[in-house]
Image (tube, rainbow, N blue to C red):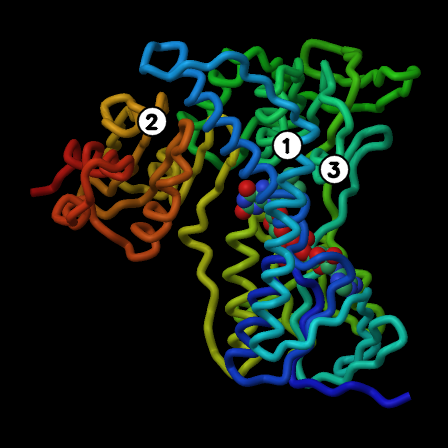
Amino acid sequence: MSAKECDLLVIGGGPAGFWAGLVGAIKGLKTILAEEGPLGGTCLNRGCVPLAVFLNYISALRLVKKLADEGYGVSLKDLTIDAVNMFKSIKSKVVDPLSGSMRDVLENLGVEVINGRALLESGNSARVGSEVIKFKRAVVATGLRWGGINGAMPPTEFTDIDEVPSTVVVIGGNAFGLGIASAFSLLGSEVILVEDGELLSGFDKEIVDYVTLALLERGVRIFTNAKVVNIINKGDIKETHLINPEGELRISSDEVIDASTYVPRNEVFGGVSVRLKGGYVAVDEYLRTSTPNIYAAGDITGNLPYAHVAIVQGIIAGLNASGGNLRINYKAVPKYLYAYPDAFSAGLTEAEAKELGYEVAVARQSLTSNALAKASGSEGIIKIVVDAKYGGILGIHGAGVGISELINEAAILLGLESTSDAVLATFLAHPTVGEVLREALIQVTKS
Ligand SMILES: Cc1cc2nc3c(=O)[nH]c(=O)nc-3n(C[C@H](O)[C@H](O)[C@H](O)COP(=O)(O)OP(=O)(O)OC[C@H]3O[C@@H](n4cnc5c(N)ncnc54)[C@H](O)[C@@H]3O)c2cc1C
């Protein structure tokens, strides 16, 4: 059988693989991308996008209801949400067309997209189904697989439900667990959130407190430092057995979703031995694995499991596999919660800055003083950690409905090592939610 030949083989068509393939083609490499499922990976098909679109739609409906309830001249007879139908529509009208557009983008650039599961057989050859592919360089971006507890459902299946559970246990106080917990609590489910450590590990404490309070006020029950021992099916009911500092507890629910446990999809390396770190594929700052012509990008590298990390890694791996020499710098990676409310933590938290010996000034601002945020019923806070001596911005943290609009400003300001005075002298448009940055930073100006 004759083999296909290419300069660059990309395995996996999620955010990391898509960007690696796109960059390789733009750089003129003959590129093949192998993907066993739909393009877009976990993020587009079963994660960030359907969840964010759903939460956006619900936010929009809540705004319409507020306008009706508070006498803004909007009348609304009956607002009902058929969540099962909404999830199906998001899939068929948003997700599937976007996945198709990704294929068009790649194919228009000359990337050959092959549908099938790839297996590396050596450092320059892979098999996809019955096809053998010889490559000069490869980027592996196969992501993670769910490894949750028996009896639970993966969070990636939330769009496939055929009924909204009246009670649901969500395991995992990370960004995605809280996103799922928010979605179901907005749909009227009674939600019990279980986390074996603290909620939103790595986020600034004030942000965690804000989000925790918002969830508690919406009736979400939260158990932290609680370990799930097992889940027992009792007919239509699931019983979750957990141990927390107060003792043992059994919680009955219609559904249990485990958003806490994932394992890297390393099996793709088949015939190639690469160094692992904690089970994930070890890469250097150029995204090279221990086999120099093979790069890895995205969740499989064990960095923060966010699509925005996967995308940047994919771009850098693609560029380096095309002869570039770029290093990745994780200094300003925002941690991000797409939920209700949203939250993010970018750069140093107040505690981290103090631990590092900075003299810290903190600027805080509530979103309620911002015209557009107030008009849309959005509440929230922004907290900026500044180096009191030189005015450098060390960290930007926020929580509130719609605060996600500020996450890119935060990432850029931190990435460019901006100072508070530089932001104050910048022409931030009015009226915008982003002006809250100016309103906070005026409190700590150096001039
Ligand atoms: C419920 C949920 C919500 C999330 N929300 C957000 C969010 O709001 N913001 C955010 O930044 N991140 C979010 N994430 C995380 C985000 O989805 C991941 O960080 C991102 O998808 C990682 O991209 P990746 O390319 O590394 O892997 P993936 O997106 O998992 O893509 C890997 C691809 O490789 C394919 N593949 C695997 N093995 C093979 C093989 N051998 N051959 C061929 N193909 C293969 C898979 O089919 C898959 O398509 C969320 C995750 C979940 C579960």
- Specify which label sits upstream in the sequence, 2 or 3: 3
Secondary structure at numbered mark 2: strand
Q: Position of residue 220 (x, y in %)?
A: 59, 15
In contact (CB < 8 Å): disc 1 and disc 2? no
Instruction: Name the quadrant containing residue 200.
Output: top right
Which of the image's four quarters has the C terminus?
top left
Category of crowding for the residue at label 2, using alpha-carbon neighbours closer than 10 angstroms: few (below 14), some (14–19), many (at least 20)? many
> Viewed as shown, does residue 240 lie left or right of 433?
right
Q: Which residue matches tag 3? A: 157
Q: Which residue matches tag 1? A: 86
Category of crowding for the residue at label 1, using alpha-carbon neighbours closer than 10 angstroms: few (below 14), some (14–19), many (at least 20)? some
> Which of the pair 387/249 is nearer the observer?
249
Q: Position of residue 205 (x, y in %)?
A: 43, 27
At 73% from the left and 69% from the top, the residue drawn is 34
Front of the two marks 1 and 2: 1
Compute the Cα span from label 3 to label 1: 14 Å
- List the single residue furthest toward the left: 447
Would the CB of label 2 be found within 8 Å of ligand 1?
A: no
